[in-house]
Amino acid sequence: MTISVRQKEGFTILDAKGKITIGAGDVVLREAIQGALDAGAMKVLVNLGGVSTIDSSGIGELVSAYTSASNRGAKLALVQLPPKVQDILQITQLVTVFDVYEDEEEAMSAMA
Amino acid sequence: MAIPPPEIHLAIKSSFTNIELVQIVIEEALKQLDLGQDEAHWVGIAVREAVANAVKHGNKLDPDKQVEIDFGVEDDCVVIRVVDEGEGFDVEEIEDPLAPENMLKPSGRGIFYMKRFMDRIDYSFRPDGGTVVTLRKSLNSSSQGSEEKEEKQK
């Protein structure tokens, strides 16, 4: 699991690749999002397009990230959800919690 | 001559790294069965959740404690048993992750996913310690959700 961070028009975009699962990817995701928020990011996009597998621990990290961002007054959205990630969020009704967009352009337009 | 379905027994130390190994083995075994690609993916996730619970909540990451996994086919069902050496838990205390007060909790979704991805989940608790979680998935249906049965053997 790797995450690369880039800046674009006031947004911090995290491109995640690989598995977001217990003990490995979940920690990487947590540290990357926390690092972005600590650096003052107010608009964060998590691009999940390269994620092959996510488990309940990974979902938990996304929820924690959403809460952390909200507590700081920052916005966090998910983009490019692969079908299986979409499914697993749907099952626990978390698609109603997160801001989810097809791609970063749509997210940036909506969150501008 | 028909190829017999795979029968597998694994025993792992209680570490997160080993969960990955179990999922790889189970997914390879599932490829030999008449289960769709998506179904196999979700069964793999359910097994991952069961083993993660055993490692984290059952054995509390104690490297001296093992998790055992048995994989086989019984009565046209994939049957996976995950056994830990922990103290067990009260099934009645499992919270509903869909309840509004739980929606933003970072944990508590693993068993919910297991129940959704398998046809049936059974729990039993050994008198001398250890939880046995049995996951079943029919090879003849693509139904989701599970009946849940708790067999407390205290």
Image (cartoon, coloured by chain):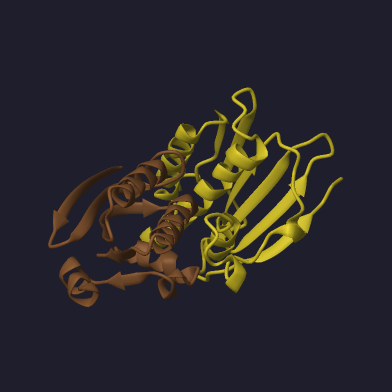
Q: Is residue B35 visible?
A: no
- Whether residue A97 is visible to the viewer of this picture, yes or no, is yes
- Chain A on-screen colour: brown
Q: Position of residue B17 (x, y in %)?
A: 45, 33
Foreground residue among B83 and A35: A35
Residue A39 picture location, percent across and down: 28, 48
Query: Which residue extends farthest top?
Result: B64
* Residue situated in front as seen by the camera: B135 or B53: B53
User: Where's the C terminus of chain A, which quadrant?
Assistant: bottom left
Left or right, B65 with reference to A86: right
Image point 41% across, 72% down: which residue?
Answer: A95
Q: Which chain is yellow?
A: B
- Count every numbered label the image shows and give the total: 0
Q: Residue at x 52, y 64 (%)?
A: B104
* Residue B44: x %, y % from top left: 46, 51
Question: With respect to residue B112, does A95 lie above or below?
Answer: below
- The image shows residue B30 at horizontal and vertical percentages of 44, 49
